[in-house]
Image: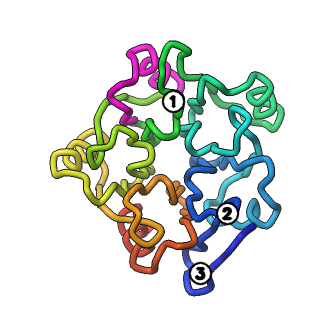
Amino acid sequence: MIKVNKVKERARTFNVDSSPYIGIFTTCTESLLLLPSNAPDKLVVGIGRALHVEVIRTHIAETSLIGCLVAGNTKGFIVSQYTLDSEIERLRAQGLEVNISRLPDSDRISTAGNVILANDTVALVHPGLSENAVAIIKDTLGVEVYKGTIGGLKTVGMAAVATNKGILAHNKATRAELEFLEQIFELPVEIGTVNFGIPTIGAALVANTKGYAAGDETTGAELGRIEDALGF
């Protein structure tokens, strides 16, 4: 069900499955947005317009937790090793013509979206990912890959959101972490929160260089910070 707060017309805030944590259920690139298979048409239209993307409905690993299990950019997607062959085939059948790779079976970490923060040139990943996983990410997404934390969290994909224009990070990120992000991405980095004070930015924000969508509990002040950080 789509919920739009009229006070926030510029951002158009949303929920997915009655949850304001939209980043758990969806992921986007410059041209594509993945939403759960049961997403209603109004949500597909609304969030697709907010981000100026084509929307593809799917499930990953037989769940709707796409944002947790998938990370991607213009060149490809990294998905959980538990993603079914039939789910990848369905993505292909819907016209997804980019690289799709699973995390290696040997890695205990399976939540690709939680542990990879990427734009079209760089990725910061969970320090515990294997070198095999790092190589897969590098080849599939066509990025330089670095390991690190944000706000002390290894789940960097939920601790920040990165586009090709800027980064919004966990409000407890240290100076050293922020400087490292600026150095490797070569982009401005700011800190903030979403959903009325939640510091795990990626849990309630999806964005590209053309637009963004936030959880429907995100305040006007938080939306202003999002716009400043991501260059809107």
Tell me the amino acid under the disc marked 3. Glu
**Rendered location of residue 205, percent (x, y):** 51, 59
Q: In the picture provided, is 179 more to the left or to the right than 16?
A: left
With respect to residue 7, does 116 lie above or below?
A: above
Residue identified by numbered label 3: 9
Of the numbered discs in the image, which one, if any, rests on residue 47? 2
- Please tell me whether mark 3 sits on a helix, a strand or a loop: loop
Tell me the amino acid under the disc marked 1. Leu
137 in the magenta segment: yes
Q: Quadrant of residue 121?
A: top left
Q: Are marks 2 and 1 in contact (CB under 8 Å)?
A: no
Which sits in the foreground, 62 or 7?
62
Q: Are marks 1 and 3 in contact (CB under 8 Å)?
A: no
**Rendered location of residue 22, percent (x, y):** 59, 58
**Rendered location of residue 175, percent (x, y):** 16, 52
Q: Quadrant of residue 206?
A: bottom right
Among the two numbered marks 1 and 3 on one chain, the one whose residue lies closer to the N terminus? 3
Position of the N terminus by quadrant: bottom right
With respect to residue 3, does 64 lie above or below?
A: above
- Please tell me whether mark 1 sits on a helix, a strand or a loop: helix
Q: In the picture provided, is 85 more to the left or to the right than 12?
A: right
Residue 3, visible in the rendered structure: yes
Residue identified by numbered label 1: 141
